[in-house]
Image: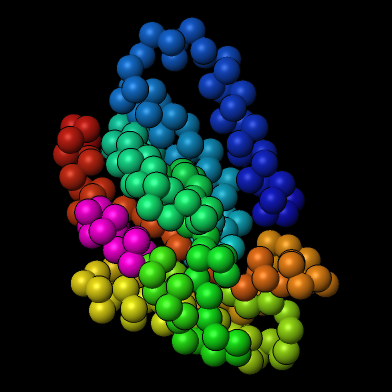
């Protein structure tokens, strides 16, 4: 079974379980629903995806799903991530913000973060868009942020690997100059891996040249959520 089919199976299992107990769900509040879903998601996603994706495999998606806590604590964390995701969407409408598990997968394409051709230098537009994320990242300071750099398939893979690392580092370094604690970041260059579009067209290559963020709870947030939930 490949990664995509594993993810699909996990989602189908979760959806089926939720629908079969819809009467029970109707009689719960938001926190209880979040906790229940957290338990199920933690068990299914952790078991099915953990073996396939690991803690950082498959880019930001793997990092987010690899950190599922589950239970009532997971519901509390998920609620905070819901709020953060909405704020990111509000300040940066062009970004692709996905709430996955108990974290956030944030994809910035060339419309949001653009680099000079064959360089890791951020353009003024890229800096302006990153500036919009700074207040949100600072408000939700109890999160870890993994930054993944990607390229298209043009050129040698070795060159693209290095370029992707340099571009991810440029994003991290810029955000750090704006006051975000550098220790929150982890940088991973993905090179030509995990294309989200065809590399056979200019439009597809543009989509593949991107930066992804995996935003997950840090140890402090997890501990606070566990105390709040009574675990």
Q: Is residue 80 visible?
A: yes
Please name whichever residue, 167 or 230, is drawn nearer the observer in this view of the structure. Answer: 167
Q: Looking at the image, which residue is at 78% across and 66% down?
A: 198
**Percent position (x, y) of residue 38?**
41, 34
**Percent position (x, y) of residue 181?**
22, 71
Residue 143 on the magenta span: yes
Please name whichever residue, 186 or 149, is drawn nearer the observer in this view of the structure. Answer: 149
Q: Is residue 103 visible?
A: no
Residue 227 as seen in the image, left or right of residue 8: left
Tally the marks.
0
Q: Looking at the image, which residue is at 50% across and 87% down?
A: 120
Location of residue 69 by image quarter: top left
**Percent position (x, y) of residue 3?**
67, 54
| In the depicted structure, whether residue 188 falls above or below residue 44 | below
**Percent position (x, y) of residue 175?**
32, 73
Please name whichever residue, 37 or 99, is drawn nearer the observer in this view of the structure. Answer: 99
Residue 84 as seen in the image, left or right of residue 125: left
Q: Looking at the image, which residue is at 21% across and 72% down?
A: 179
Q: Looking at the image, which residue is at 47% across and 87% down?
A: 121
Please name whichever residue, 99 or 86, is drawn nearer the observer in this view of the structure. Answer: 86
Q: What colour scheme governs how the chains and residues are painted in the rendered image of this protein? A: rainbow
| In the depicted structure, whether residue 189 falls above or below residue 18 | below
| In the depicted structure, whether residue 27 falls above or below residue 51 | above
Magenta range is 131-146
Residue 30 as seen in the image, left or right of residue 209: left
């Amino acid at each position: 079974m490949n990664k995509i089919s594993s993810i699909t199976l996990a989602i189908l299992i979760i959806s089926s379980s939720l629908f079969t107990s819809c009467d029970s769900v109707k009689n719960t509040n938001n926190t209880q629903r979040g906790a229940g879903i957290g338990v199920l998601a933690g068990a299914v996603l952790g078991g099915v995806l953990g073996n396939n994706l690991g803690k950082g495999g498959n880019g930001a998606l793997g990092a987010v799903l690899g950190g599922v806590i589950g239970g009532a604590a997971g519901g509390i964390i998920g609620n905070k991530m819901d709020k953060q995701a909405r704020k990111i969407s509000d300040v940066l409408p062009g970004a692709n913000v996905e709430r996955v598990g108990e974290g956030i997968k944030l994809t910035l394409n060339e419309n949001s973060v653009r680099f000079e051709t064959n360089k890791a230098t951020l353009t003024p537009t890229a800096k302006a868009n990153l500036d919009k994320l700074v207040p949100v990242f600072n408000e939700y300071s109890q999160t870890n942020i993994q930054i993944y750099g990607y390229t298209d398939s043009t050129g040698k893979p070795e060159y693209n690997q290095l370029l992707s690392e340099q571009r991810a580092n440029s994003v991290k370094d810029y955000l750090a100059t704006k006051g975000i604690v550098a220790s929150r970041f982890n940088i991973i260059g993905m090179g030509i891996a995990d294309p989200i579009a065809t590399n056979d067209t200019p439009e597809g290559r543009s989509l593949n040249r991107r930066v992804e963020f995996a935003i997950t709870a840090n140890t402090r947030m997890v501990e606070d959520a566990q105390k709040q939930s009574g675990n």
